[in-house]
Image: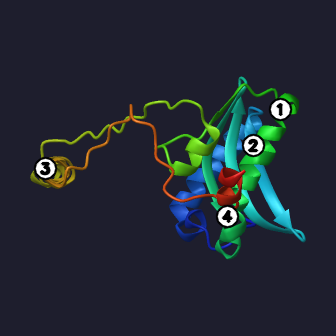
Amino acid sequence: MERLGGTAIQCDPRTKQFYDLVAQAAARDGYLSLDFLELNGSPIAAHFGFNLRGKYFLAKAGYNEAFRRQGPGQLLVHEVLSQTPQRGLREFDFVGPATWDESRWASARRTNYRIFIFNRTWYARLLYFLRITLREKFHLMSGRHDDESVPLELKSKPQGSEKESEQ
């Protein structure tokens, strides 16, 4: 991902080192998948993923904001999916919390869990109170709660969707 300068990974040396080590291990074992969508030789979208046992795990994705109207991330997902037979894929896993754009490609959702472990120090208790207790109370008061059994709503329409619905 070094070719996309200014990324969140590049901004923190520890984060970059982590991704470098993960990439080296995955490359050594043959399941690293670095995919780029290029325009005139310059990357405008990239995937840092893993192709393992017929599943593509998209760990990190990025795109050049200057091209956001053209949907370079969506185009790259489409390209990877179009190569399903050559890559031996049965499944594309977006990894992490579901997003509206994932719902364009997925027919089902997998539940993801976040697990927080706090020790018994005063600082950890404060973090627990702020991160867990207050957040839950806020969600209850605001009527906002995450029900993963409910399908995601498409919050914005993809380009050309008005024309498709008129036909």
Identify the element where label 2 is drawn: strand
Which mark is first along the chain, 2 or 4? 2
The amino acid on which the numbered mark 3 sits, given as a three-letter code, is Lys
The amino acid on which the numbered mark 1 sits, given as a three-letter code, is Arg
Give how far apart the Cα atoms at labels 4 and 2 are: 16 Å
Tell us which disc is closer to us: 4 or 2: 4
- Coordinates of residue 118 in the picture (x, y in percent): 21, 42
Q: With 124 as the anchor, is 44 left or right in this view?
A: right
Give how far apart the Cα atoms at labels 1 and 4 are: 23 Å
Residue at 66%, 69% (x, y): give it: 68
Rate crowding at label 2 as few (under 14), some (14 to 19) or many (20 or more) other CA atoms within 10 Å: some
Q: How is the image coloured?
A: rainbow
Q: Is residue 6 visible?
A: yes
Q: Which residue is mark 2?
A: 33
Which mark is first along the chain, 2 or 1? 2
Q: Is residue 95 above or below residue 6?
A: above
Q: Is residue 109 above or below residue 103?
A: above
Identify the element where label 3 is drawn: helix
| 141 or 155: nearer the viewer | 155
Do labels 1 and 2 touch, CB within 8 Å?
yes
Which mark is first along the chain, 3 or 1? 1
Residue at 67%, 64% (x, y): give it: 63
Q: Which residue is mark 3?
A: 137
Residue at 16%, 47% (x, y): give it: 140
Q: Is residue 75 above or below residue 93?
A: below
- Coordinates of residue 126 in the picture (x, y in percent): 12, 54
Q: With 78 as the anchor, is 7 left or right in this view?
A: left
The amino acid on which the numbered mark 2 sits, given as a three-letter code, is Ser
Give how far apart the Cα atoms at labels 1 and 3 are: 46 Å
Which mark is first along the chain, 4 or 1? 4
Q: Which residue is mark 1?
A: 87
